[in-house]
Amino acid sequence: MSLATDLPGAAGRGELVPYYQPQIEVASGRIIGAEALCRWQHPELGLVPPLDFIPLAEELGTIHEIGDFMIEQGCAFAASLVADEIEVAVNVSAVQLADPGFSARVTETYQRHNLRPENLTLEVTESRPVTDLPDALAQLDRLRDLGIGISIDDFGSGYSSLKQLDALPFTELKIDQSFIREDTDETWSRVATFVAIARYRGLRIVAEGIENQEQLDRVRAVGCDRAQGYYLGMPMPREEFEAFAKANVRTPLPKLSAAARRALAAIGVRNVEEVSTWARAELGALHGVGPSTLAALTAALTAVGLDFAAGNAAPS
């Protein structure tokens, strides 16, 4: 009863707080995105989890107020991260898509922040099938035509299905974390199927719920583009995210031959920062890594203020 009474106006009273969870590029380990997540700092009850108030907000109609607040915050944050090439994803309820003015408000917000539309993704969270909402398809089509990414969240659970993929203009598929956490051969086979389906449709693929290195290795093996989860970074306030991103910079490798890339990948080197943990002689002993590769790696290290590690023992 208290939540239902207090939720209306919470955004205007400054009680809602956006948290941001990092998304990494699986191939390089570089932070390339952030998912904006809403938290409610209730003056008496403390921090209220979203599962306790988002369904209530949809029932009360307060989800429009909360959604507009999160899009405003997400666009402002994304605009501040343009130089770091970090995109921001904001969750959008199916109920919001039923509002005919939704796409116009999103457009006005990102334009006011001088944000490139491709730096914003809207993640469709389904409290009901989006295809049941007459205005939803038109809204999503308009936003995608502008260049905004459209993601199907929690794919494989709830209403997320192949029917939705075929009916709506998605650009990204987020694999539900339940498949990652179950961690059986059967579920990983299903994840591989999801990846194949998404690849066929030209969609970017994000794995949710990564909690250990083994899971990260497996989503890399099946071909996911991005990953997020507690192992890679907890949801955090804006200032903490900015500090976390700066401390976890991952610079892509320079242009190398296919043989050199395979040799480096085999020892777990997928970005410039990981190169710096190896000695020049160690990398030079790898099949496929010659003088031109070492020269390119040296230049890449110098560009980010790093050097090869000390030592000259060949890797075992």
Image (cartoon, helix red, strand yellow):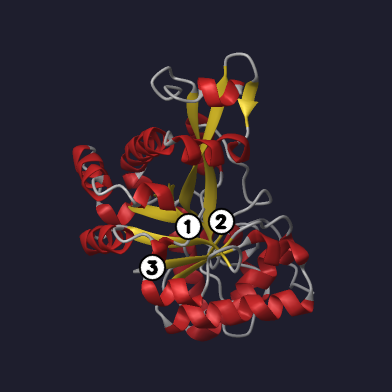
Q: Nearer the viewer, mark 3 or mark 1?
A: 3
Q: Which residue is mark 2?
A: 273
Q: Residue at 65% x, 63% y: name it.
A: 279
The residues bearing labels 2 and 1 have C-alpha atoms spaced at a distance of 7 Å
Expressed as whole percent of the image width and height from the top left, the position of residue 25 reads 51, 61
Q: Mark 2: which secondary structure? A: helix
Q: Residues within 10 Å of mark 3 (few under 14, many from 20)?
A: many
The residues bearing labels 3 and 1 have C-alpha atoms spaced at a distance of 29 Å
Q: Earlier in the sequence, mark 3 or mark 1?
A: 3
Q: Earlier in the sequence, mark 2 or mark 1?
A: 1
Q: Nearer the viewer, mark 3 or mark 2?
A: 3
Q: Quadrant of residue 170?
A: bottom left
User: Disc 2, disc 1: CB below 8 Å?
Assistant: yes
Q: Is residue 197 left or right of residue 176?
A: left
Is residue 306 positioned above or below 296 on the image? above
Amino acid type, residue under disc 3 in the picture: Phe
Amino acid type, residue under disc 2 in the picture: Glu
Q: Is residue 179 visible?
A: yes
Q: Residue at 54% x, 36% y: name it.
A: 56
Q: Residues within 10 Å of mark 1 (few under 14, many from 20)?
A: some
Q: Which residue is mark 1?
A: 251
Foreground pick, 68 / 32? 68
The residues bearing labels 3 and 2 have C-alpha atoms spaced at a distance of 33 Å
Q: Which residue is mark 3?
A: 170
Amino acid type, residue under disc 1 in the picture: Thr
Expressed as whole percent of the image width and height from the top left, the position of residue 88 reads 41, 48
